[in-house]
Image (tube, rainbow, N blue to C red):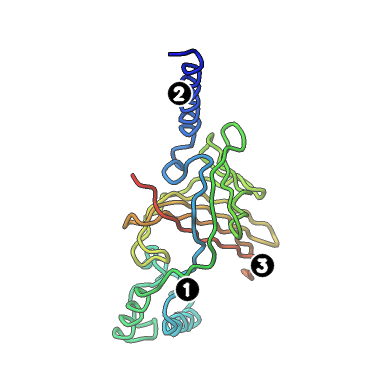
Amino acid sequence: MKIQQWWRASAIVLMGAASAAFAGEVPEVLAKYFQADVPVKAQIVMIVPPQEFEKFVQKLSEAAQKDPEWFAEHTQSTSSGSPIPEFHEKLGMTRDEYDKYVKLWDSREAKKLEDVSIMLTKSAEGEWKLNGTGSANSLSLVRYQVEGNQFKSPNGVLENINDINAPDRSLLGAWTGKEWRYQSENTLTKMKENIAVGDTNDGKYSILIYRLQEVTSSGKPLFDKSLFIRFAAKKK
Protein backbone atom coordinates (compact mmCIF):
# COMPACT_ATOMS: atom_id res chain seq x y z
CA MET A 1 0.00 0.00 0.00
CA LYS A 2 1.34 3.44 -0.90
CA ILE A 3 2.14 5.70 2.04
CA GLN A 4 -0.60 8.20 1.03
CA GLN A 5 -3.24 5.45 0.91
CA TRP A 6 -2.06 4.03 4.22
CA TRP A 7 -2.23 7.48 5.79
CA ARG A 8 -5.77 8.12 4.53
CA ALA A 9 -6.95 4.70 5.73
CA SER A 10 -5.33 5.18 9.13
CA ALA A 11 -6.80 8.66 9.47
CA ILE A 12 -10.31 7.39 8.68
CA VAL A 13 -9.97 4.62 11.25
CA LEU A 14 -8.71 7.05 13.88
CA MET A 15 -11.48 9.55 13.13
CA GLY A 16 -14.07 6.80 13.40
CA ALA A 17 -12.60 5.63 16.70
CA ALA A 18 -12.57 9.19 18.04
CA SER A 19 -16.21 9.69 17.04
CA ALA A 20 -17.21 6.42 18.68
CA ALA A 21 -15.34 7.36 21.83
CA PHE A 22 -17.02 10.76 21.94
CA ALA A 23 -20.45 9.24 21.40
CA GLY A 24 -19.69 6.76 24.13
CA GLU A 25 -19.31 9.61 26.58
CA VAL A 26 -23.03 10.34 26.42
CA PRO A 27 -24.44 9.63 29.91
CA GLU A 28 -26.32 6.36 30.04
CA VAL A 29 -29.51 8.04 31.21
CA LEU A 30 -29.58 10.15 28.01
CA ALA A 31 -27.90 7.75 25.55
CA LYS A 32 -31.11 5.76 25.43
CA TYR A 33 -32.75 8.66 23.61
CA PHE A 34 -30.03 10.80 22.00
CA GLN A 35 -26.69 10.65 20.22
CA ALA A 36 -24.16 13.43 20.65
CA ASP A 37 -24.52 16.21 18.06
CA VAL A 38 -27.27 14.41 16.13
CA PRO A 39 -30.49 16.44 15.79
CA VAL A 40 -33.74 14.62 16.51
CA LYS A 41 -36.99 15.65 14.84
CA ALA A 42 -39.69 16.09 17.48
CA GLN A 43 -43.09 17.61 18.12
CA ILE A 44 -44.43 19.74 20.93
CA VAL A 45 -47.89 18.36 21.66
CA MET A 46 -50.87 18.99 23.88
CA ILE A 47 -53.37 16.38 24.99
CA VAL A 48 -56.92 17.13 23.89
CA PRO A 49 -59.90 15.12 25.16
CA PRO A 50 -63.30 15.40 23.44
CA GLN A 51 -65.18 18.59 24.26
CA GLU A 52 -67.80 16.67 26.25
CA PHE A 53 -65.12 15.76 28.79
CA GLU A 54 -65.29 19.33 30.09
CA LYS A 55 -68.55 18.42 31.84
CA PHE A 56 -66.64 15.81 33.87
CA VAL A 57 -64.03 18.40 34.84
CA GLN A 58 -66.82 20.72 35.96
CA LYS A 59 -68.39 17.99 38.12
CA LEU A 60 -65.03 17.28 39.74
CA SER A 61 -64.61 20.99 40.44
CA GLU A 62 -68.04 21.13 42.10
CA ALA A 63 -67.24 18.07 44.22
CA ALA A 64 -63.96 19.67 45.31
CA GLN A 65 -65.75 22.85 46.36
CA LYS A 66 -68.37 20.95 48.38
CA ASP A 67 -65.86 18.92 50.40
CA PRO A 68 -62.26 20.00 49.72
CA GLU A 69 -60.70 17.77 52.38
CA TRP A 70 -62.47 14.61 51.24
CA PHE A 71 -61.85 15.36 47.56
CA ALA A 72 -58.12 15.90 48.09
CA GLU A 73 -57.81 12.67 50.05
CA HIS A 74 -59.88 10.68 47.54
CA THR A 75 -58.01 11.87 44.45
CA GLN A 76 -54.58 11.41 46.02
CA SER A 77 -55.35 7.90 47.19
CA THR A 78 -57.09 6.60 44.06
CA SER A 79 -55.77 8.41 40.99
CA SER A 80 -52.43 6.48 40.79
CA GLY A 81 -51.01 8.87 38.19
CA SER A 82 -54.29 9.33 36.33
CA PRO A 83 -56.29 12.58 36.35
CA ILE A 84 -59.43 10.47 36.84
CA PRO A 85 -60.15 9.42 40.44
CA GLU A 86 -61.98 6.19 41.16
CA PHE A 87 -65.76 6.33 41.16
CA HIS A 88 -67.52 7.55 44.29
CA GLU A 89 -71.07 8.84 44.73
CA LYS A 90 -69.67 12.05 46.25
CA LEU A 91 -68.25 12.95 42.84
CA GLY A 92 -71.79 14.02 41.94
CA MET A 93 -72.53 11.61 39.08
CA THR A 94 -73.99 8.18 38.47
CA ARG A 95 -71.84 5.16 37.67
CA ASP A 96 -73.05 5.26 34.04
CA GLU A 97 -72.06 8.92 33.72
CA TYR A 98 -68.67 8.16 35.24
CA ASP A 99 -68.07 5.28 32.80
CA LYS A 100 -69.03 7.56 29.91
CA TYR A 101 -66.45 10.16 30.95
CA VAL A 102 -63.77 7.50 31.32
CA LYS A 103 -64.43 6.41 27.72
CA LEU A 104 -64.20 10.03 26.60
CA TRP A 105 -60.81 10.34 28.31
CA ASP A 106 -59.63 7.15 26.63
CA SER A 107 -60.34 8.78 23.25
CA ARG A 108 -58.10 11.81 23.94
CA GLU A 109 -55.61 12.79 21.22
CA ALA A 110 -52.15 14.31 21.10
CA LYS A 111 -52.46 17.50 19.05
CA LYS A 112 -49.29 18.81 17.42
CA LEU A 113 -48.52 22.39 18.33
CA GLU A 114 -45.10 22.76 16.72
CA ASP A 115 -42.39 20.84 14.90
CA VAL A 116 -39.04 21.24 16.66
CA SER A 117 -35.58 19.73 16.68
CA ILE A 118 -33.65 18.55 19.76
CA MET A 119 -29.88 17.96 19.84
CA LEU A 120 -27.71 16.78 22.72
CA THR A 121 -24.31 18.46 22.94
CA LYS A 122 -21.46 18.43 25.41
CA SER A 123 -21.18 21.87 27.01
CA ALA A 124 -18.31 21.16 29.41
CA GLU A 125 -16.47 18.25 30.96
CA GLY A 126 -19.11 16.14 32.65
CA GLU A 127 -21.91 18.45 31.51
CA TRP A 128 -24.44 18.12 28.68
CA LYS A 129 -27.24 20.27 27.33
CA LEU A 130 -30.27 19.78 25.12
CA ASN A 131 -30.52 22.40 22.39
CA GLY A 132 -34.05 22.90 21.11
CA THR A 133 -35.43 24.92 18.24
CA GLY A 134 -38.55 27.07 18.38
CA SER A 135 -40.46 26.92 21.65
CA ALA A 136 -38.13 24.17 22.87
CA ASN A 137 -35.15 26.56 23.03
CA SER A 138 -35.62 27.02 26.79
CA LEU A 139 -34.28 23.47 27.27
CA SER A 140 -30.75 24.76 26.70
CA LEU A 141 -30.90 26.58 30.05
CA VAL A 142 -31.03 23.22 31.85
CA ARG A 143 -27.74 21.29 31.89
CA TYR A 144 -27.28 17.63 32.82
CA GLN A 145 -24.35 17.05 35.18
CA VAL A 146 -22.94 13.53 35.18
CA GLU A 147 -21.59 13.88 38.70
CA GLY A 148 -24.61 13.65 40.94
CA ASN A 149 -26.96 12.54 38.14
CA GLN A 150 -28.67 15.91 38.23
CA PHE A 151 -29.77 18.81 36.08
CA LYS A 152 -28.88 22.40 36.86
CA SER A 153 -30.87 25.44 35.78
CA PRO A 154 -30.55 29.16 36.58
CA ASN A 155 -33.00 28.47 39.42
CA GLY A 156 -31.05 25.69 41.12
CA VAL A 157 -30.32 21.95 41.05
CA LEU A 158 -32.94 19.47 39.85
CA GLU A 159 -32.44 16.28 41.85
CA ASN A 160 -33.34 12.82 40.55
CA ILE A 161 -36.58 11.60 42.16
CA ASN A 162 -38.63 8.41 41.85
CA ASP A 163 -38.78 6.65 38.48
CA ILE A 164 -41.92 7.22 36.42
CA ASN A 165 -44.28 4.34 35.74
CA ALA A 166 -47.35 6.12 34.40
CA PRO A 167 -50.58 4.15 33.83
CA ASP A 168 -52.53 3.99 30.60
CA ARG A 169 -54.93 6.72 31.76
CA SER A 170 -52.21 9.20 32.70
CA LEU A 171 -52.09 12.39 30.65
CA LEU A 172 -49.60 10.95 28.15
CA GLY A 173 -50.71 7.32 28.40
CA ALA A 174 -48.63 4.44 29.70
CA TRP A 175 -44.92 5.29 29.84
CA THR A 176 -41.83 4.81 31.98
CA GLY A 177 -38.89 7.07 32.56
CA LYS A 178 -36.76 9.22 34.85
CA GLU A 179 -37.61 12.54 36.49
CA TRP A 180 -35.66 15.36 38.15
CA ARG A 181 -37.15 18.16 40.26
CA TYR A 182 -36.24 21.47 41.89
CA GLN A 183 -38.45 23.15 44.49
CA SER A 184 -38.13 26.39 46.41
CA GLU A 185 -40.40 28.41 48.66
CA ASN A 186 -40.26 31.75 50.45
CA THR A 187 -42.80 33.98 52.15
CA LEU A 188 -44.07 35.29 48.81
CA THR A 189 -43.81 32.53 46.19
CA LYS A 190 -43.39 28.83 45.52
CA MET A 191 -41.46 27.48 42.53
CA LYS A 192 -41.26 24.00 41.04
CA GLU A 193 -39.17 22.94 38.05
CA ASN A 194 -39.28 19.45 36.53
CA ILE A 195 -37.65 17.64 33.66
CA ALA A 196 -38.45 14.04 32.69
CA VAL A 197 -37.53 11.68 29.88
CA GLY A 198 -38.83 8.23 29.00
CA ASP A 199 -40.51 5.89 26.51
CA THR A 200 -44.13 5.00 25.87
CA ASN A 201 -44.95 1.39 26.70
CA ASP A 202 -45.92 0.64 23.11
CA GLY A 203 -42.36 1.46 22.01
CA LYS A 204 -43.45 4.10 19.47
CA TYR A 205 -42.31 7.31 21.13
CA SER A 206 -39.82 8.81 23.50
CA ILE A 207 -41.08 11.63 25.72
CA LEU A 208 -39.32 14.72 27.04
CA ILE A 209 -41.17 16.92 29.53
CA TYR A 210 -40.08 20.26 30.92
CA ARG A 211 -42.18 22.35 33.27
CA LEU A 212 -41.51 25.49 35.30
CA GLN A 213 -44.26 26.71 37.64
CA GLU A 214 -44.40 29.62 40.05
CA VAL A 215 -47.33 30.53 42.30
CA THR A 216 -47.91 32.93 45.15
CA SER A 217 -47.86 31.63 48.72
CA SER A 218 -51.67 31.51 48.51
CA GLY A 219 -51.55 29.40 45.32
CA LYS A 220 -52.31 32.06 42.70
CA PRO A 221 -50.51 31.18 39.43
CA LEU A 222 -47.72 33.56 38.41
CA PHE A 223 -45.93 31.58 35.70
CA ASP A 224 -46.39 28.20 34.05
CA LYS A 225 -44.27 27.00 31.13
CA SER A 226 -44.94 23.44 30.06
CA LEU A 227 -43.36 21.51 27.20
CA PHE A 228 -44.61 18.04 26.24
CA ILE A 229 -42.26 16.84 23.53
CA ARG A 230 -42.40 13.49 21.77
CA PHE A 231 -40.24 11.92 19.07
CA ALA A 232 -39.74 8.52 17.49
CA ALA A 233 -38.09 6.11 19.91
CA LYS A 234 -34.58 4.97 19.04
CA LYS A 235 -34.44 1.50 17.58
CA LYS A 236 -33.03 -0.94 20.08
Name the side, left or right, on which 26 lies relative to 214: left
Rounded to the nearest angstrom, the CA distance separating label 1 from label 3 is 25 Å
Is disc 1 placed on a helix, strand or loop? helix
Is disc 2 placed on a helix, strand or loop? helix
Q: Residues within 10 Å of mark 3 (few under 14, many from 20)?
A: few
Q: Residue at x 49, y 36 (%)?
A: 26
Q: Earlier in the sequence, mark 1 or mark 3?
A: 1
The residue identified by callout 2 is 13
Residue type at numbered disc 1: Glu
Q: Residues within 10 Å of mark 1 (few under 14, many from 20)?
A: few
Rounded to the nearest angstrom, the CA distance separating label 3 from label 2 is 55 Å
User: What's the mark number on residue 222?
Assistant: 3
Residue type at numbered disc 3: Leu
For residue 179, above or below residue 227? above
**Quadrant where the C terminus is found in the figure:** top left
Asked if marks 3 and 2 touch (Cβ < 8 Å), the reply is no
